[in-house]
Image: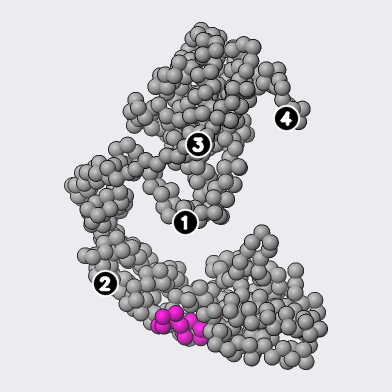
Amino acid sequence: MPVLQEPLNDASYAALEWVSLVGEEGDGYAPWRLASKFFQQARRLEGDGQPLQSQAMQVLGGAISMHLRHPSHAPFGPVFQSREGRSMSMEDLGEHDVALLARAARDAPSPWLRARFSDLAVTADGSTPPDWRLGRLAVDAYLEYVASVFGTEHAIGGLDELQRSLVLLWVYAKKDHALWDRYWTVILDEIPHSIEKNWPGLVFRLCDEAISRNRHACEAILPQIEAKALALEAESPQEAARWHAQAHRLNQRLGKRQEATASLMAQGEAMARAAELAAEHQPMLGPMHMTEAISLLRKAKAAPSRIQELRDRLATYERASLDHYGHFSAKTDVSDWVKWIDEQLAAPDFFSALLRMAYRAGQWLNVEEIEERVRKNFAKHPLSSLFTATHVNSDGVVVSQRPPLDLNDPTSVRLYAISDASQTDIPMRSSIMVSRAADTLYTAYQPSFHAIKEIVEASPITPVGQTETLARGLFSGFIDDWLAASVYLIPAIEPFVRAQLKRSGTHTTGMNEDGTQHEKTLGELLDMPEAERFFGKNLVFELQVLLTEPEGFNLRNSYCHGLMSDRELQNAGIMSLWWTLWRMILFPWHDHPAVLANLPPTTS
């Protein structure tokens, strides 16, 4: 909502005397401190009975406080947000607020303030055509500010303003070649300064701008990047690899294919050296670095003998890394949960108890709840998700990597939800509910294999020709033979899912280039929109966590490729898969009186 509800006349504007508040803070190093001065003055004016001037001070202070978030469709956002509210954002500015900022931009005593006010005014206004003079004022002011901080200890602080100014330069002064040259002179002068200070974060982002905007700048920057990479190779090979990666990108931009390949090769060799050093001092990092080195050298088409040599080293590093992994556990009192489970399972006969196990004792994973838990956990413990997580198998082989959590990326949130479910929800369900239910039902009713087979055969959900396999796997769970359950149920789940999708009219095959068809894999089937429409998003998520996702149990892929030992097959994932299959097979009776008995009216 706009702050100023009416325009500020000349006399009221002159009476603000806001320039006197600026002082040294106008250089952009401490914007919140400067904004606080304006907010304090706004409160004083409000107390003196001058509401219009108070509102004007709030607008100026709010503009100073905003966070520059480049790149973005709304480049100025609130500097803080909470449940109670947030600070001012660009979206809050109205017509009279914009007019005040445009006027203040011309009177601003420092280039940072001049750039901030003029940029906000012309961007928030959004009129067509825009105010070209105001836009040009912002471009010139940004350049003056960036030139004043580049080459100093505060150079990094001017990076966001530089990137923002290059966007405005293209809009308001793209035909001014002299101004363009001045901008790139400032940028190119900063490159050696940042390299000397060892500020790769600044150098690399300036490289990004050169790659996207200025080929000649790439030619000037490339030799400096290559020299820095060579200088780092002996003492810091991992850091050298980062610089070689930038050299690779610059060579690609310049169309130098051979040089780009050489940079990629150098990056891979640097990572191999980093792996060698890590194996001596940080054994858990050695396999990760070596895996990356092999990947890079393959892209660079290194000699096969070199790749094989590094793979041999990788195997050695992987075996050595296993000695450095630890085990962590904690005790939890689940006696109340166990008591509740027993109450849910109480029934007059085996079939009724089985239905209650499937539909009373537990529920499928709720993907929305788990994703929300991921967001809340990140808010409470942000450091836990700020770094890449690496997963290795029992041989120390790196099988997956989970990048830092990005709450704005649904795919990233889903990845963390899968990991969270496989580490928390599934183990808790399996070790307590599934274990207790299977033991209780078998002890109380002693069901035979033939009794289990009759139930499986009676279900219309059971695919034709799979009754025996499913019945043997489901019976094995009751007698605590989870190895047998794995052998029967994991291979059976893919045709089970395929049969249900075919029943709904879904095409489960894909077309090859030669005109032949192939059956889609389980992972591909679960990724189909038709799978979510038929099974529901929670069941699809459950099956992905258990069967196809590397961040989950990945039972289908690991077992079918022969990557699981007998001991590894007996895990929480197969126990939950056993219960999930029971729940699916018994779906035709999910509203059976045995399931609905003794439930509150609102639940039933």
User: Which mark is drawn over residue 227?
Assistant: 2
Closer to the camera: disc 3 or disc 1? 3
Please tell me which residue is depicted at 43% across the width and 69% down the height of the picture. 205
Please report whichever mark, 1 or 4, sits nearer to the chain's N-terminal start: 1
139 sits left or right of 156 in the view = right
Task: Report the Cα–Cα distance between label 4 and label 2.
Answer: 70 Å
Please tell me which residue is depicted at 61% across the width and 66% down the height of the picture. 80
Please tell me which residue is depicted at 47% across the width and 37% down the height of the picture. 331
SS class, disc 4 = loop
SS class, disc 2 = helix
Please tell me which residue is depicted at 60% across the width and 69% down the height of the picture. 79
Please name the residue that numbered disc 1 is placed on. Answer: 383
Q: 437 and 150: which one is in front?
A: 437
User: Which mark is drawn over residue 332?
Assistant: 3
Please name the residue that numbered disc 4 is placed on. Answer: 603
28 sits left or right of 187 in the view = right
Q: 65 and 510: which one is in front?
A: 65
Up-down relation of residue 305 to residue 479 (above or below): below
**Type of the residue with mark 3:** Thr
**Type of the residue with mark 1:** Leu
